[in-house]
């Protein structure tokens, strides 16, 4: 193997390097609390045009184009999987306005900005303008969690990103197909006919493929362990076959295929979508590293004052005009309209789609195609960095920021949940108690706690509960199996270290012990629902004690030998814990403990 400029890297080494840099950059960005796109861009540019360690065109040759094409196809299929039509119908009217009015309006205004400000021709402007509809849920979700927005504007931004992700790609497909047809000398009538044929054929193939996959999965014609591999192969096959039948129809077909599967109400849908989300993270990071490494200094030099002016117009004119005109006449308050109007980050998906069509426009002889990728990179990085720093202050200025203190979500109304909620509320920690039985929420409501009547695992809770305001989950119902189910299902959302539950009745022994992949961490002394609430009936209380220089953890345990810890408050953040957890509390840490009547 050689890494010289002449010999280059072996293809397998280049592919491994792309994977390591992509995932490693995202991990490092998570550790440093900065946007992952910034780290991926820096890593790609460093190993590519700066050091020349990896040059994709040299090291991977003809594989570069197919790799990007397949990655974009899988990314858009995953985007189709997120489009649950029932959930969209149940969403606020503002979401529908942002999709029905905002998407075409944003396409038009973006194309105008690209032509008159960035200086691109109409062909490149129409294709790239369609792709600019994409905001991307993979970008907006971390920003929303970081800024802790109020539920309604956060829901609007999240749903707009979910729906417009595939719509932007389809708009770019539509524009490119029209341009390609006209480049071949076809008139307007023939171009429209070819476009209708492409949509009909690609739509039919994608729709039938989605129905076939859903039917096979529902009738158990495919075993569970083969469902994900079959899905992957089906996506690749439909993408390639459709492209062979109708040029550039593959992306439309796989997007519709994902849409059909998403709305087929499959029992295994959650597992399929979760795995596809993980695959999309790998593909998105890999594509971005590949694109950044493919840049050269000559391409970057194409960026001039027009690029800066274009970014300014997109942020200050295109996005606000699109949102405000779409929401005109709605009942949405003006502060929420302004927040949504000035929040429009673009993500890695836009870069991948831009690169996909830039290569095709360049192959058609359009010189502007080469300028799309650097413009896309600048747009992505600028908007992510800008909104990453500006979103939280803007939300606070408009009165739409939630509390910055991480909250506690308790599943299960009970005296214990009420007592713990009262303690947290007294220390300005947000608390939400959820239960499927309305009467169990009476006591938390009377105590002034926020409650939600319903099942935390239902679709209603998915869109009705402001999960972004809560960092800690405690499953504390009287049903051990349900507690385990809730903790397991929501662990990817909260992080496994932030999911807790009360001890199951039969926890020890090989017959009853569960693997570490199921359930959450146990709190307190390892007692269950009935024992914990029984202690409260006997007079036990939840008390908070501050640890200082002269009164440490050992002193507290000596003074309260029968009490046991269930958590601690460090600065303003709550951390649930077992009583026997080993930790060294800093001065100022507050211990949250169950104490017997004599000490209470």
Image: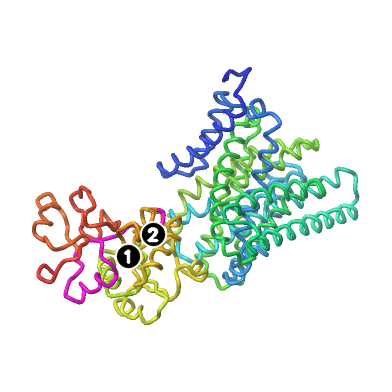
The image shows residue 429, relative to residue 372, as above or below, that is below
Magenta range is 517-543
Q: Position of residue 107 (x, y in %)?
A: 69, 54
The answer to whether 7 appears left or right of 47 in the picture is: right
Residue found at x 41% / y 54%: 517
The answer to whether 569 appears left or right of 321 in the picture is: left
Q: Is residue 325 visible?
A: no
- SS state under label 1: loop
Q: Is residue 484 visible?
A: yes
Q: Nearer the viewer, mark 2 or mark 1?
A: 1
- SS state under label 2: loop
Q: CA distance from mark 2 to mark 1?
A: 10 Å
> Is 340 one of the magenta-colored residues?
no
Q: If the image is split into quadrants, where does the N terminus sit?
A: top right
Question: Which of the labelled discs sits on residue 519, or is there none?
Answer: 2
Q: Position of residue 334 (x, y in %)?
A: 52, 67
Residue nearest the viewer, comparing 304 with 47 = 47
The image shows residue 443, relative to residue 508, as above or below, that is below
- Cβ atoms under marks 2 and 1 closer than 8 Å: yes
Q: Earlier in the sequence, mark 2 or mark 1?
A: 1
The residue furthest front is: 511
For the rendered model, the colour scheme is rainbow
Residue nearest the viewer, comparing 244 with 211 = 211
> Is 521 one of the magenta-colored residues?
yes
Question: Which of the labelled discs sits on residue 504, or is there none?
Answer: 1
Residue found at x 63% / y 67%: 85
Residue nearest the viewer, comparing 374 with 338 = 374
User: For residue 392, which quarter of the picture?
Assistant: bottom left
User: For residue 319, which quarter of the picture?
Assistant: bottom right
């Amino acid at each position: 193997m050689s890494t010289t400029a002449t010999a280059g890297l072996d293809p397998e080494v280049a592919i491994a390097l792309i994977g390591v840099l992509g995932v490693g950059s995202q991990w490092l960005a998570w550790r440093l609390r900065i946007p992952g796109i910034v780290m991926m861009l820096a890593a790609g540019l460093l190993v590519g045009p700066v050091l020349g360690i990896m040059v994709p065109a040299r090291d991977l040759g003809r594989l570069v184009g197919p790799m990007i094409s397949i990655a974009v196809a899988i990314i858009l299929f995953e985007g189709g999987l997120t489009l649950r039509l029932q959930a969209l119908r149940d969403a606020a009217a503002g979401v529908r306005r942002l999709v029905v009015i905002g998407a075409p309006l944003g396409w038009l205004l973006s194309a105008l900005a690209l032509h008159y400000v960035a200086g691109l021709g109409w062909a490149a402007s129409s294709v790239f303008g369609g792709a600019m509809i994409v905001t991307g849920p993979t970008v907006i979700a971390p920003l929303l969690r970081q800024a802790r927005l109020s539920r309604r504007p956060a829901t609007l931004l999240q749903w707009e990103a979910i729906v417009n992700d595939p719509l932007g790609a389809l708009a770019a497909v539509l524009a490119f197909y029209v341009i390609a047809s006209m480049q071949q000398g076809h008139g307007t009538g023939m171009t429209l006919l070819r476009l209708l044929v492409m949509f009909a054929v690609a739509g039919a193939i994608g729709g039938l493929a989605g129905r076939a996959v859903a039917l096979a999965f529902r009738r158990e014609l495919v075993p569970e362990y083969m469902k994900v591999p079959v899905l992957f192969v089906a996506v690749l096959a439909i993408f390639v076959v459709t492209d062979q039948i109708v040029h550039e129809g593959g992306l439309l077909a796989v997007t519709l295929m994902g849409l059909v599967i998403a709305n087929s109400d499959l029992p295994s849908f959650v597992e399929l979508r979760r795995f596809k989300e993980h695959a999309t993270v790998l593909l998105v990071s890999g594509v971005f590293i590949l694109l950044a490494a493919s840049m050269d200094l000559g391409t970057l030099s194409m960026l001039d004052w027009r690029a800066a002016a274009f970014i300014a117009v997109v942020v200050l004119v295109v996005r606000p005009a699109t949102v405000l005109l779409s929401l005109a006449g709605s009942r949405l308050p003006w502060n929420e309209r302004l927040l949504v109007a000035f929040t429009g980050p673009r993500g890695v998906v836009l870069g991948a789609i831009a690169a996909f069509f830039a290569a095709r426009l360049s192959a058609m002889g359009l010189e502007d195609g080469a300028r799309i990728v650097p413009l896309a990179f600048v747009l992505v990085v600028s908007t992510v960095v800008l909104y990453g720093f500006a979103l939280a202050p803007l939300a606070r200025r408009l009165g739409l920021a939630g509390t910055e203190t991480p909250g506690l979500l308790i599943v299960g109304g009970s005296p214990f949940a009420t007592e713990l909620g009262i303690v947290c509320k007294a220390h300005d920690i947000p608390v939400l108690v959820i239960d499927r039985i309305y009467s169990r929420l009476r006591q938390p409501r009377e105590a002034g706690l926020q409650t939600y009547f319903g099942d935390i695992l239902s679709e209603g809770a998915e869109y009705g509960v402001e999960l972004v305001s809560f960092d800690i989950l405690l499953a504390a119902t009287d049903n051990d199996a349900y507690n385990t189910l809730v903790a397991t299902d929501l662990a990817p959302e909260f992080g496994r270290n932030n999911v807790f539950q009360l001890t199951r009745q039969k926890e020890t022994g090989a017959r009853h012990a569960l693997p570490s992949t199921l359930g959450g961490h146990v709190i307190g002394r390892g007692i269950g629902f009935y024992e914990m609430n029984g202690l409260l009936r006997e007079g036990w209380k939840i008390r908070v004690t501050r640890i200082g220089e002269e009164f440490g953890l050992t002193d507290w345990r000596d003074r309260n030998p029968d009490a046991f810890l269930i958590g601690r408050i460090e600065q303003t953040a709550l951390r649930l814990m077992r009583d026997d957890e080993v930790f060294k509390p800093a001065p100022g840490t507050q211990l949250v403990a169950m104490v017997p009547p004599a000490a209470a």
